[in-house]
């Protein structure tokens, strides 16, 4: 294991989240087993692993949407019991009903926390907050558009705008980069940096090795259990990636290198990562690890 806390029994006093010996079963099938992690305020953490690795399960337990079979999650030292308003969860885009007859602006306004009944009209201040969130994600001009008419990247921006309204200290995102265009990916990375500078903790699930290496302070490599946890440059290597993905992957540490595995896989500039981890990408077809 690389810098992993998977078997830790004591926790960092500065951690905002303490996950201890967490196990979740769906009937007799374990989804995640004995996961222990400490996550600090202001940290951007990617949960990286293949489909079925338990990334979404871990996020839902932290969000208070799914009970643990064993173990615990503590937020600022106190046990998490159900949904906590300080923790904002952004689901996968595919799980939403985009045919619902509602505009972009209305969808975002519904994300406003309210202490008065939902049937009452939004105040001017509330509408302005929603508009500011849409401006922040570049969607204000499409406020009157029905949500089903949006592209995948635009729909994901709507999700993020709603999340910004919660103003929680922890933001959980399930596959935020999946199926979105490059401008939306760049926007998300920029927003992540802004939120991180404000002391927000960001935890997101992904199966994209390159994106995890480029955008994370720490990668938690999962496949039912924690395989490695640490800065991308140390957590992502031949052994850990092989164990997580059950096959061979390609690791490119030089810019502008192309590799063929049925089709060309372009490499991004190696200097773009937080930890100079190089460009790391998963291929659809098995190939040899290169350095």
Image: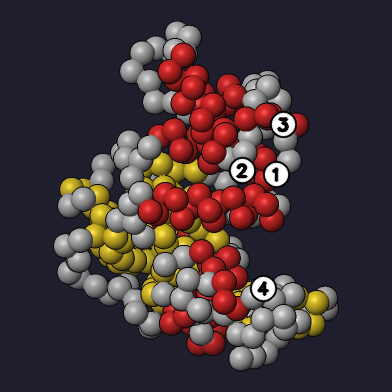
- Gap between marks 3 and 2 measured at Cα: 12 Å
Element carrying mark 2: helix
**Crowd tier of the residue under label 3, counting other residues whose Cα lies within 10 Å: few below 14, some 14–19, many 20 or above:** some
- Quadrant housing residue 156: top right
Eye-nearest disc, 2 or 4: 4
Residue 261: give x, y in percent of width and height. 78, 81
Is residue 96 visible in the rendered image? The answer is no
- The image quadrant where one finds the C terminus is bottom right
Tell me what residue is drawn at x 38 percent, y 82 percent: 2
Q: Which residue is mark 4?
A: 268
The disc, 3 or 2, on the residue closer to the chain's N-terminal end is 3
- Gap between marks 1 and 2 measured at Cα: 6 Å
Q: Which residue is mark 1?
A: 152
- Gap between marks 1 and 3 measured at Cα: 10 Å
The disc, 2 or 4, on the residue closer to the chain's N-terminal end is 2
Q: Which residue is mark 2?
A: 156
Q: Which residue is mark 3?
A: 148
């Amino acid at each position: 294991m690389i810098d992993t806390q998977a078997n830790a029994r004591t926790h960092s006093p500065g951690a905002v989240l303490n996950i201890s010996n967490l196990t979740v079963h769906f009937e007799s099938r374990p989804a995640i087993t004995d996961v222990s992690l400490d996550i600090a305020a202001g940290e951007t953490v990617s949960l990286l692993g293949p489909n079925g690795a338990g990334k979404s399960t871990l996020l839902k337990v932290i969000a208070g949407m799914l009970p643990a079979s064993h173990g615990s999650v503590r937020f600022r030292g106190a046990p998490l019991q159900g949904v906590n308003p300080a923790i904002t969860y952004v689901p996968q885009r595919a799980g939403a009903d985009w045919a619902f007859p509602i505009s972009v602006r209305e969808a975002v306004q519904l994300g406003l926390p309210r202490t008065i009944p939902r049937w009452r009209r939004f105040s001017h201040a509330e509408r302005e907050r929603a508009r500011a969130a849409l401006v922040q994600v570049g969607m204000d001009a499409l406020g009157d558009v029905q949500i089903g008419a949006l592209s995948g990247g635009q729909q994901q921006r709507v999700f993020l705008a709603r999340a910004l309204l919660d103003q929680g200290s922890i933001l959980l995102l399930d596959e935020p980069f999946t199926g979105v265009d490059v401008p939306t990916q760049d926007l998300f990375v920029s927003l992540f940096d802004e939120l991180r500078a404000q002391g927000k903790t960001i935890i997101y699930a992904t199966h994209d090795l390159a994106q995890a290496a480029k955008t994370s302070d720490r990668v938690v490599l999962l496949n039912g259990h924690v395989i490695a946890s640490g800065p991308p440059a140390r957590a992502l290597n031949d052994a850990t990636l092989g164990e997580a993905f059950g096959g061979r992957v390609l690791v490119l540490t030089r810019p502008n290198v192309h590799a063929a595995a049925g089709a060309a896989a372009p490499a991004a500039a190696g200097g773009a990562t937080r930890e100079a981890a190089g460009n790391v990408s998963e291929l659809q077809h098995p190939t040899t690890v290169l350095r």
